[in-house]
Image (cartoon, rainbow, N blue to C red):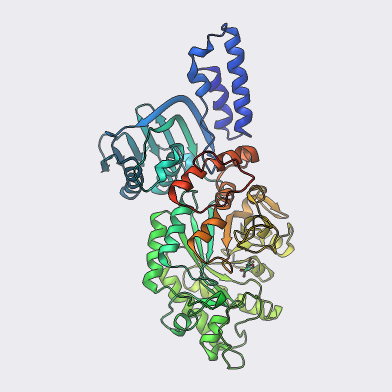
Amino acid sequence: MSAASVLLKSPGRVGARRSRSRIRRALLAVVLVAGAGLGGAIGASAPAAAAAFPNVVVPAPASEVADGTTFTLASSATITSDDADVGGYLATILRRSTGYPLPLTVGAGTPGTVALSLSGAPSSVGTEGYELVSSPSGVVIRANQAAGLFHGVQTLLQLMPGAVMGSTVAAGPWTVPGGTITDWPRFGYRGAMLDVARHFFTVAQVERYIDEMALYKVNYLHLHLSDDQGWRIVVNSWPNLATYGGSTEVGGGAGGFYTQADYQAIIAYATSRYITVVPEIDMPGHTNAALASYASLNCNGVAPALYTGTNVGFSSLCVPLALTYTFVDQVVGELAALTPGPYIHIGGDEASSTSASDYATFIDKVQPIVAAHGKAVMGWHNIAATSLAPSTLAQFWDTTTTDSALAAAAASGTKVVMSPANHAYLDMKYTHKTKLGQHWAGYVDVNTAYGWDPGDYLTGVTGSSVAGVEAPLWTETIVTSADIDQMAFPRLPALMELGWSPYSTHDTTSFDQRLGAQGPRWHAMGVNYYKSTQITWPTGS
Ligand code: TNX
């Protein structure tokens, strides 16, 4: 074993690598010293200098050990997989861009050139992690579950030239650097939220976003299904919610809604990318679309007009009214029956038209309704002002670093998903020049999105109190898939690196370089990403 590979191995193993650039400098020093000692003969041992993985994978893997070799995918290559879906996913992407036949065999047999195996992975990689071994003869990815194979496939694709992500045949060579990556997530919740209420997005648009987020190991898709400006899912027991409440959107457009079959199609698509859907019905505020659809839900019995502006905080369900809880029970009941995931998000934010005591009464009554339908509650962190059931997950969205009610809830066991608006909100403008988005929480360029530690951010909400990270995309100003792309990329990958990678890898210089390496991939895919000036985008981006 060369000095260089020893040098790389130990920091990689313990996940204590601070900066690949630092390692590269050290490596260069070793090579130079060794070269000097050998009277300059180092030129012959080129593999030593090559023995570092290129700094291209986002999120940064927990551990990487390069060996200086290279695998090149040939037209005669084969794929085997213990999981038909993950094997099919990989084969589809590789066939499209390489033009090679790449026959796929599922199940037992001789491993193919690229082998996805559900046996032999280290138990330490858990349910979502994987081990990837690349050598001149092929690539083996091992995981304990299919989700791990899928994440390993994302890493493999990122180790290949960016053109591999294109939809037409491109020229190779289709190389993969040699070595071993052992990788698993820091947090169990790594989410992206899409607000389909302010502007409606079709099933195809949501699926496109799912495909994009899956590249960065997102495992939860939070769908904000209702707000003042629109109700986006059919509830059979309250049909006007969709047909009337869904008939408009911000700016007065036609809006839209998902049939229950549409919603199930989104769930099935997300599931095929190992992503769990969390549906949100925002209550008791943000409910104008529901109140407009049914006069009987209003305290005064009068339905307000539909709303297409962008104000918040003016609507509230009628807390003293018995019918309110029939409504919540039936809506949550239908949604829970359609949703395989563990959570129903009940919103709870910005309820400024609900008195504090009504708010507490409402959350107290709604938590057991959700539980009765077999789901755990997720809610914006404002719900921590009330008493929470042990399984309730709170989502922090403020711009402060202290929140005493949330800290107290965390002390009694509430887990928190971190979405601080001034770092994690994908609808914030990057700079004052950004056309789309808002800036009430400040400007959020890439390094601001990346520059915090979810596990040590909020006073009293650290370590095991943190369930993970979510990147919400509110859509008051977002209308098209190109708009979604522009706001989510490159910030969503930054936030997912915070959710996946050990914090010991946190290094802005290294991150910016790895993020830049995504440019050619997004170019090949037609992702309309924002070319932040904080990043050096390589040729082909
Ligand atoms: C705040 S933060 C909201 C949303 C808006 C968003 C716009 C939170 C939970 N609610 O209703 O769409 O700001 O940035």
x, y percent for residue 92: 33, 47
Q: Residue at x 63, y 25 (%)?
A: 25
Q: Is residue 314 left or right of residue 75?
A: right
**Residue 298 visible from this viewpoint:** yes
Q: Residue at x 59, y 26 (%)?
A: 24
Is 437 above or below relative to 317? above
x, y percent for residue 485: 52, 56
Is 423 above or below relative to 262? above
x, y percent for residue 148: 43, 45
**Residue 144 visible from this viewpoint:** no
x, y percent for residue 436: 60, 62
Pick whichever, 528 or 201, lies toward us.
Answer: 528
Q: Is residue 41 left or right of residue 96?
A: right
Q: Is residue 315 left or right of residue 71?
A: right
Is 16 above or below relative to 277? above
Q: Quadrant of residue 352?
A: bottom right
**Location of ligand 1 given as a quarter of the image:** bottom right
How many numbered tags mark residues here?
0
Q: Quadrant of residue 100?
A: top left
Q: Is residue 404 left or right of residue 242?
A: right
Q: Residue at x 61, y 37 (%)?
A: 510
